[in-house]
Amino acid sequence: MANQEFEPSVFELYKLYKETTEKVSDRRAVANTWMLSVNSALVAFYVLMEKGKEIVGSSGRHLWLFALPVAGFIISMAWAALLVSYRKINHAKFKVLMEMEHHFPYALYTREDQILHESKRWNLSNIESWIPWAFGLLYAFLAIVVLCGW
């Protein structure tokens, strides 16, 4: 699994690289929070437009009721693409970390990956990716409702 010859310089590089991996995860969490906030605001604004005819008038209201779901759908698909990008970056970074572990007495991430794979657990990244798609489906449904006049 790992080499018994420990190389301190490689370990320092490993620690530094691990920090960059954590920073990518932190950026991903911030992006998720921001995107969730934007989508929540869009849904709230949609509900406000749906309930408040006197705010913008009848013709302006229909425009908003269509434009908001379209904008929300685009934002949700951008969010989904962003998650795929972050997932690929993290995958590559962990692969590099696992390769570096061959220089250490014990390969922690490699072993963790094996255990998680054996447990057949639901991957959190996959679950996380459902959220923008759920918003996207909601927005598509709302746009269809407006177009059909329901």
Image (cartoon, helix red, strand yellow):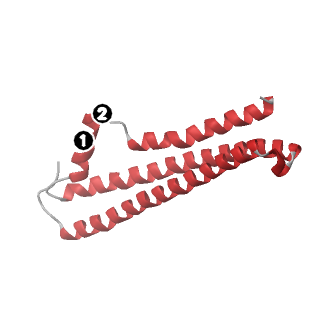
- Image quadrant holding the C terminus, namely top right
Q: Is mark 1 on a helix, strand or loop?
A: helix
Looking at the rendered structure, the kind of residue marked 2 is: Lys
In the rendered structure, the answer to whether residue 5 lies left or right of residue 87 reads left
In the rendered structure, the answer to whether residue 82 lies left or right of residue 11 reads right
Label 2 Cα neighbours within 10 Å, binned few <14 / some 14-19 / many ≥20: few
Q: Is mark 2 on a helix, strand or loop?
A: loop
Mark 2 or 1, closer to the camera: 2
In the rendered structure, the answer to whether residue 129 lies left or right of residue 97 reads right
In the rendered structure, the answer to whether residue 54 lies left or right of residue 87 reads right
Displayed quadrant of residue 63: top right
| Residue 130 x, y percent position in the rendering | 50, 39
| Residue 118 x, y percent position in the rendering | 25, 35
- Residue 97 badge: none
The residue labelled by disc 1 is 114
The residue labelled by disc 2 is 120
